[in-house]
Image: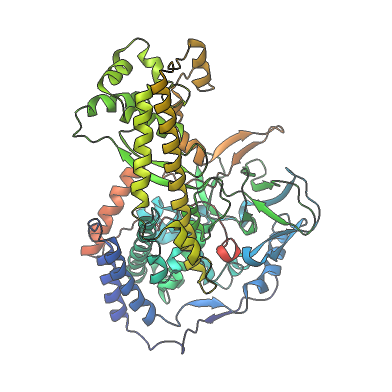
Amino acid sequence: MGKKSRVKTQKSGSGASAVVSPKEMMNLVSELLQKCSSAVPSAGKEWEEYIQIRSLVEKIRKKQRGMSIVFEGSREDYFPDLMSWAQENGASCDGFTVANFGMEGYGLRATRDIKAEELFLWVPRKMLMTVESAQNSVLAPLYSQDRILQAMGNVTLALHLLCERANPASFWLPYIRSLPQEYDTPLYYQQDEVQLLLGTQAVQDVLSQYKNTARQYAYFYKLVQTHPAASKLPLKDSFTFDDYRWAVSSVMTRQNQIPTEDGSRVTLALIPLWDMCNHINGLITTGYNLEDDRCECVALQDYKENEQIYIFYGTRSNAEFVIHNGFFYQDNAHDRVKIKLGVSKSERLYAMKAEVLARAGIPASCVFALHCNEPPISAQLLAFLRVFCMSEDELKDYLLGERGINKIFTLGNSEFPVSWENEIKLWTFLETRAALLLKTYKTTSEEDLSLLEKPDLSLHARVAIQLRLAEKQILEKAWASGLAKRLNYQKKLEEGAPLPHYEESDIALLENANADAKLPIILRKLEEVEEGQGTQVEELNEGKMMYRLDMEANEEPVQGETQEKVGKDVHSALDSVGSSNQVGQREVADQSASRTEENPKENSE
């Protein structure tokens, strides 16, 4: 299996800090837990809270300096061991090798010509680190007694990874040693680098990610030190914030959903070797073969010998790439900006609008997205805006008029306006809303472009500026599109152009493919289809049942309980931890991003 594991105590700055008493550290950690478990700050106070939490974390990190365990040598030293270990355990290794691709960092390089759709990579289940393997590890006693670990697989994987890293005899050591020692997720940003994101649509998720991670660390530190079931964990002697930050980043940049052995449900896993692939636009080409019990990946395109092999991570926005994967993808065909819209309950026509929306399968308040491509809005958002801008007579027509139910089918179709006046209103609204959102940024697009020309920008600062610039460019396109559409429909109104009406034969074009499911186009939850959701089952030509690994699944399904119930249980448990030493924990800092990769230096490092 190659050279033996070499570990050393990390030296930082002038060396390890003075010994800190357990009582002193416990007091600091308790203070951090209390701060992170307090009520949600009022609007505009999130940055102030972040600074306070970060200050406590830095105090803890300073006292823990030199206590983390790291591997000697460079990451590259361990790639031969990774390949040997993979080959010994049944993975395919003959068509590629690990190589350095400069600004993209490490990735897979083809060692022979590979044809599009050729199966070139497979990884058997026994090589994967999963929630199930955690249940059969040293973590098992604590897992069996902690219902938060049982509910949150990403937390379990993070602790599993740390326990195995500390075990010189771990089966997964060749894989763990090949992981980056640091990442470029916002958890590693300096305060001034995070500050560059203020005013962006992404900043709230960034601040929440840091707060959640700090809270989780504080809770698990106390749990490891006090819970009888944690007495044999290797983390008991050394469990630093930097350790947990590394584990959280490793999991959230690499985790994916796979089926359990019996195929009855999905579980979270880290997939060695495959997670070295960098991202490119395309289609999902990875699945799980239950018959052979392995993860399989086919080539996205033809690759010549010595070319880099890419995979498609999924339809992620750049905000998701930055927050969960640690890189910005310049040519992201699926970039988008979140926009929250809702019908005010105080509005006179609220009940009627809510009813029309309900019939269309759309909530009266929802987070939508503005897209980087034309059209900037999805069919679902178009349908919402049409209802949002309806007059009372138009609402009555859709609720009570002739063929009113059938008209629901056309709400998400741009070919069939409600009325010219309605179209003018909705595009005016979009134009105005985009303009207002643009005013919330502290810099203009031109200023950001100028800043990006500076050669002395740190990598994180550059990524932050790229992200806020991309958001503004999407909003600018939405504004321009709204303006153009408004002028177009004003012209049609002035010219007295006839309003297009659907015929009964048109309905077939708007229905779902299922003959027995005549649902409005918007009921298909187009945003979710577009962005990918979870694990899908496909029947291959060979007759093998495959689980398509959709790297967009943002939440791990919780078996037997709803997300809402688990959320309440978690908050309740945390409340009790804050006031006593009882058990509880919130979800790992937005580790929900399912797909892996290295950080920006290497599409992540």
Q: Residue furthest front?
A: 495
x then y, percent, for residue 535: 53, 41
Position in image of residue 41 (x %, y %): 24, 58
Residue 320 is situated, as x and y percent measured from the top left of the image, at 47, 53
Q: Which residue appears at 43% of the width and 18% of the height?
A: 497
Residue at 29% over, 75% down:
28
Q: Quadrant of residue 56?
A: bottom left
Colouring of the image: rainbow
Where, quadrant-wise, is the C terminus in this rendering?
A: bottom right
30 horizontally vs 419: left or right: left
| Residue 523 quadrant | top left
Q: Quadrant of the N terminus?
A: bottom right
Can residue 41 be seen here? yes
Where residue 154 sits, quadrant-wise, is bottom left
Q: Is residue 138 visible?
A: no
Seen in the picture, residue 239 relative to 185 is either above or below; the reply is below
In the shown orientation, is residue 467 left or right of residue 351? Answer: right
Task: Give x and y (percent) for residue 588.
Answer: 40, 58
Which residue lies at the image location 51% right of the left edge and 23% below the top edge?
512
Residue nearest the viewer, comparing 571 with 276:
276
Above or below: residue 424 compared with residue 17:
above
Total residue callouts: 0
Q: From this view, report whether residue 294 is shown above or below residue 171.
A: above
Asked if residue 238 lies left or right of residue 547, the reply is left
